Image: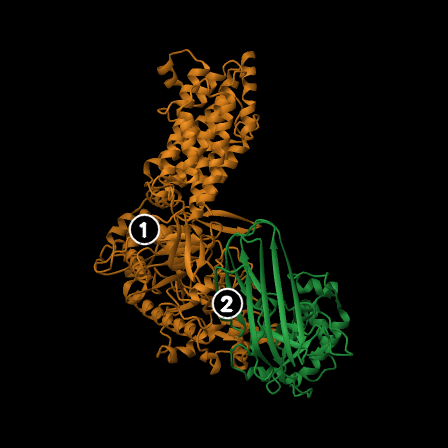
Chain colours: A orange, B green
Amino acid sequence: MSRTASYRPLPGVPDEMVAPDGKVRPLWRRMVAHLDALSEDGLSHNLSRADRYLLDSGVFYRQYGGGESVERPWPLSHLPVLLADDEWKEIGLALRQRADLLEAVMADLYGPNELVASGRLPAALVAGNPEWLRPMVGVRPRNGHFLHFLAFELGRGPDGEWWVLADRTQAPSGAGYALENRVATTRAFSELYADENVNRLAGFFRDFRDALQAQAGDKDSRIAILSPGPMNETYFEHAYIARYLGFALLEGDDLCVANNRLMVRTVQGMRPVDVLWRRLDGHYADPLELNPASRIGTPGMVAALRAGSVTMVNSLGSGVLETRALMAFLPQLAPELVRAPLAMPNIATWWCGNPAAREAVRASPRRMVLADALTTRLPFDPKDDPTRAVGLPADVLDRRLAQGGGNLVAQEAVTLSTTPALVDGKLVPRPMALRVYLARTADGWAVMPGGFARIGTGADVSAIAMQEGGAAADVWVVSKASVPAITMARQAGVADKRLVPGGLPARAADNLFWLGRYAERAEGIVRLMRAYHTRLAESDKAGAQLLAGFDPLFRQIGIDAREPIPQRLLDNLSAAIRSASSVRDRFSPDAWSALHDIDRTARALAPKVAPGDDAARTLSALLRKLAGISGLVHENMYRFIDWRFLTIGRLHERAMGTAALLAVLCDPGAPEGALELAIEVGDSVLTHRRRFSFSVSRATVIDLLGLDPLNPRALRHQIDGLREQVDMLPAANDQGALSPLAREVLRLHAKLATTDPDTLTTETLWQVRGRIAMLSDLLTTSYFH
Amino acid sequence: MLYRLRLSIRYDFARPTGAGRQLLRISPADLPGMQEVQQASITVTPPPAERSGFIDFFGNEVTQLVLPAGLTQIRFDMAGRVLRLPGESELDLSAPLDRLEQDLDDITDLGPHSPHHFLRASPRVALLAEIADFARAACGSASTVREAVECLGIALHSHMRFDARATEVDTPIAQAFAGRRGVCQDFTQIMISGLRNLGIPAAYVSGFLRTVPPPGKPRLEGADAMHAWVRAWTGAEAGWTEYDPTNTCFVAANHVTIGYGRDYGDVAPVTGSMRLAGSQSGSHSVDIVAED
């Protein structure tokens, strides 16, 4: 039997692929033919292309639980959900109406408050609502609109009609994941995708980007995405969208408010921000006027909004529209606020502060989901609401309604449609909810032609069963006629506002600098350990003395020689990943994967490797991987100022390491063989042989690894590099007047350029190393504050 | 009663600060029929980099400051003259307790003085079960809202001892209530929690208390510092009534109001954010003299 022929929808539940008569819907016929034509191996090979893509591009989300958070690979359900474009048009019309309705409610709640005054909304739902941000009341958005980017959670009921399950108005996530789902899914179904007329997603993002750029004022101002930071569960997406749209990715601490204008602290000084797409909840945005406990906000943000100097996507306080009890009132408000009844119903909702609503809820207790009236959670998210209860016995329900009906909301427990999913190679029906995105553009609300489908884990089709652990699928909106290919290139007629490449946020610069340092330090440790274990493998009496000669170096960097892969190395890799994770919008995805790959390998091998030859070989393998990262970064990264800080970090760390290496191993008191060791750790064996034949002396080693400007591993070479890079930093060289940092680098350069192996004594080397260390402080005070 | 007010708040920093933003809520409020501000001014030393003002949601006057970096000390001085009109009559026009909910339902206003803002928990006032039990026990015999306010105030005063060293500005009310000690802020926030638990809207009032008592009267508790008390909504007819749980009295001409909020956080005299490297210490002094 073919793969699809064994597929059976659940009885009484509408299925996306198979009609009630048991026949495959026309829309799915090509998909079915495609699936049936594939062999077992062919299919699994195709699916693995998608998995490979997600792994390679580092798509992840962060999951919290048990007191810790972990990055999880993206749970793609490979089979896309297919929807016909005429059905999609209906959905789009209905959601645009709903978006307008929400905008009108928002404008009232933060404006005249007539809905409450006239009794159409209960005062308690607003006044008692933590999402109603009082400091924002009376603040008109700069461009007149409160809402710019929305998402709606939809489900298809038993009659085949769509319902709105929830409105997402605060800071909807998932649009970036929808893009990644699309890329991954097209890898798995490339042949089919080429044949089907699947509507492209890029146009939606392009139009929204252009709309935001039209909001930005002068050409020096910028558009930024405000993220809570790398610990947020959807940080990957924040970085991804920032990169995709060419916006700056900022955190609250990057911003400050001066003269009521929002400014970003960059290494070039303060730069204004005109449009902020926030991905954090409103009350975190300003510790001064909103939540004082917020450590991710910007003091004065509300003042800047009050002054009308920045456009916020969406306005602070928009979370109030996610209040579940509000859904009880939207159907009545629609005819007045958007002059038509709701084109798509939301799930039947009752605010239990109202006697008639309590009656209705009592009438069918088993079909009710009870929750905190003010909850903003999705209906299938049971977290943090002790009030939540499903199908309570009538007497318990009565008691709870009598105790505090005003604090409760009841919703009908709805069921969803199913869509085919591939589970262990088999096609099975799984419940599905759809997330659809709308963005405000020059032509009004635009609907993303596609989206994000949540796929349930089991066969339970009740909406509330869609909890964590489910998967996400791409949504293909399929046209009968061919669809135009779309790129992110600007539409004709839209003014080209070039993104200013400067303006590197100070925090990002700091992270890039440290990323450079940690990566280089890791490499230094690996080289040293490899040399140690190579000698350990061929150790005799003289060798033992030499091995003891490593001790000062090990002490210097805090290594325990008994660990072949020292904890110190793993710590450095973690630190490098932490720095890189804060600058993912600026860091090559390939280098990011490579960094993770090394970290994984090192951690997996650390407990297994035996000292000596085994360790030496493992360390060689790690070294090759590390060199691969350097290659990815330095061969591929555009020479923006981003690269400069990364490079300065690398040069700085290598200079420090080389100075210490020479000070210890070229000391006149160093054991026999120390000079050869220095040459090896300094990766200059062949060069030494070519320049000095086989005669090794302190002078030749200091010359080659200390003073030779042409040796990329020499101390002198690092200082030359630092001088070149530092001179190009902002305000480093103001018509000949050097900054303190540039001056100090120049002095170091002069020192090395005018010294010789005899005067570069052990003591001088330690002094030079101390002065290099101080450069880090100078850099920090000049650029990272 | 005409008062001359002086308030001085000072912070010392062990190491020079980074730049910072501050909001001050230290000016007496102009309240038609209750108090009239004849003059008020705020001096900031050293001078701020930016200074502006706005009226917040609850109608309080806010001074907004941007302070330059490098401060080792900052002072905020407020000087003013306020005419405090005599208190309202002692007649109990408040709603019967069982009618309050209906009175509330009839209010559909969300303006700054709407009782609806003051019914639920707020950031610093949790609706704690132990305080709810305490409030129910204290108000068992009360039939009107005003009686309930007074019963709870008296009960709280005998439960708690005024102790300036027992609590800090951020001590949670659960801790102050369990320890049975605190200052006006604790008394006020615990009483607010009790009232809200009974379904009575209750707000936080920050202000001043005259420092020199009238001849023959004892000096009131908390008179050397800024003061706080409760504002309770007692029904559609009587509206708001103010009660001072630290001194077990309805508020009259001895109290001068700065502002209203859901709890201390909404009317804190100084709210700020500043990059600090070392420790800081603060002090404040208040002086109110009756002029007649």
Residue at x 52% of width, y 16% of height: A668
Residue A167 image position (x, y, % from top left): 43, 66
Q: Which residue is mark 1?
A: A500
Q: Chain of mark 2?
A: A
Residue A131: assigned label = 2
Residue A193: assigned label = none
Residue closer to the observer: A257 or B97: A257
Q: Is residue A231 above or below residue A718?
A: below
Residue at x 59% of width, y 84% of height: B33
Amino acid type of disc 1? Val
Residue closer to the observer: B47 or B281: B47
Q: Is residue B28 above or below residue A744?
A: below
Residue A656 image position (x, y, % from top left): 47, 30
Structural crowding at the residue carrying mark 2, measured as other residues with C-alpha within 10 Å and reported as few (<14), some (14–19) or many (≥20)? many
Residue closer to the observer: A421 or A556: A556
Residue at x 48% of width, y 37% of height: A573
Earlier sequence position, callout 1 versus callout 2: 2
Q: What SS does tag 2 mark?
A: loop
- Figure quadrant of residue B233: bottom right
Q: Chain of mark 1?
A: A
